[in-house]
Amino acid sequence: MATRGGPSRRVPENDSTIAYVQADGLAVMKIVKHCHEEAASNMDIAQGALLGLVVDNRLEITNCFPFPKHTDDTMDEEEYQLAMMRRLRRVNVDHFHVGWYQSADVGNFLSLPLLESQYHYQTSIEESVVVIYDSQKSSRGFLTLKAYRLTQQAIEMYKEGEFTPETLLKLKVGFENLFVEVPFVIKNSALTNIMMSELAEMVPEEQGSKFLDLGTASVLEGQLRCLMDRVDELNQEAIKFNRYQQLVSRQQQDKHRWLQKRSQENAARAAKDELPLPEEDVNKLFRPHPVPPRLNPMIIAGQINTYSQHISQFCSQSLAKLYITQALQNAKESKTTI
């Protein structure tokens, strides 16, 4: 997992934030090629470094390169990145590290390793972003590239290193405000646009049959299965937290009974003109139970929210296709009866 942010290159705190990300078409093609190669070969997550520069409030991505695979133990990842940037600098290519990219599947990019990696990047390179490429959705004709940055609340949460319910409540951190999405724009040169226009004229016009394809049951089934798995995981986390609350409640009752018993004993000794029992630290007798971290359940809740949004969007499109095909079928049947 990408856990290094390269050379530290912090910008002043009063600088304007990144308003949008602008990526060159060549860099986007490199990301797409790498992600699809990894998905087709061994279904691993593809990761790589993003290179470019910051112009005013715009982050420009002009180049990228993949990270080495974890199977190669002889190669140091940080040394590899530095060597690649030195070689790119020699050939007069933008070599400033501005973030990293990662492939995803149906939006399930939200995870603990991604949060940790982006925290290391954003604390060492202030303007860095993580670009998520949805390989499965893109393979079906919908190019999906999104750029994200950690919010200030999420950075403060990682700085404190405590993921207890009290800390998350104090910082007002939830799965909906862990990341902030930055607008992503693809820019091509004038020559590329001319070539794309010529290619568009050479491609024959579509007949429209593919737009009403109803063979989408397998996709919906896969998304629902993933959603069910995440709901089961969240249920297990809820059971753990409920068990912790029961243990705390039982311990509080035991502590209260012990204090009552000690006060009664001291009152009886005082009636006999005897010295009270020595005071003891209650926390030593009743050690507090460790609080289960709430970061993992929050991430699972974020994944459930993402899957639900995808399923809702998918079902809306499918229902629209069904109504359109039903109208076309009715029109066809009416013509045959005439």
Image (cartoon, rainbow, N blue to C red):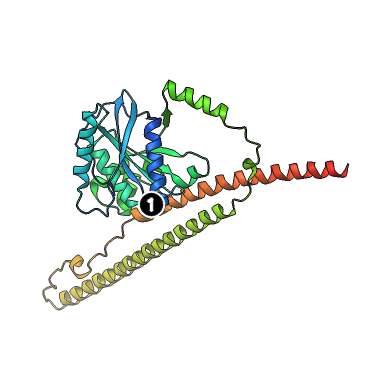
Residue at left 27%, top 55%? 71
In the image as oriented, which residue stretches furthest toward the right? 338
Q: How many marks?
A: 1
User: Quadrant of the rendered structure where residue 277 is?
Assistant: bottom left
| Place of residue 176 in the rendered image (x, y in percent of width and height, measured from the top left) | 41, 44
Residue at left 34%, top 28%? 60
Depth check: give the residue in front, 255 or 240: 240
- Residue 197 seen by the camera: yes
Q: Is residue 289 above or below residue 2?
A: below
| Place of residue 142 in the rendered image (x, y in percent of width and height, measured from the top left) | 51, 40
Q: Amino acid at mark 1?
A: Ile
Depth check: give the residue in front, 265 or 335: 335
Is 200 situated left or right of 233 in this image? right
Name the residue carrying label 1.
299
In the image as oriented, which residue stretches furthest toward the front? 202
Element marked by disc 1: helix
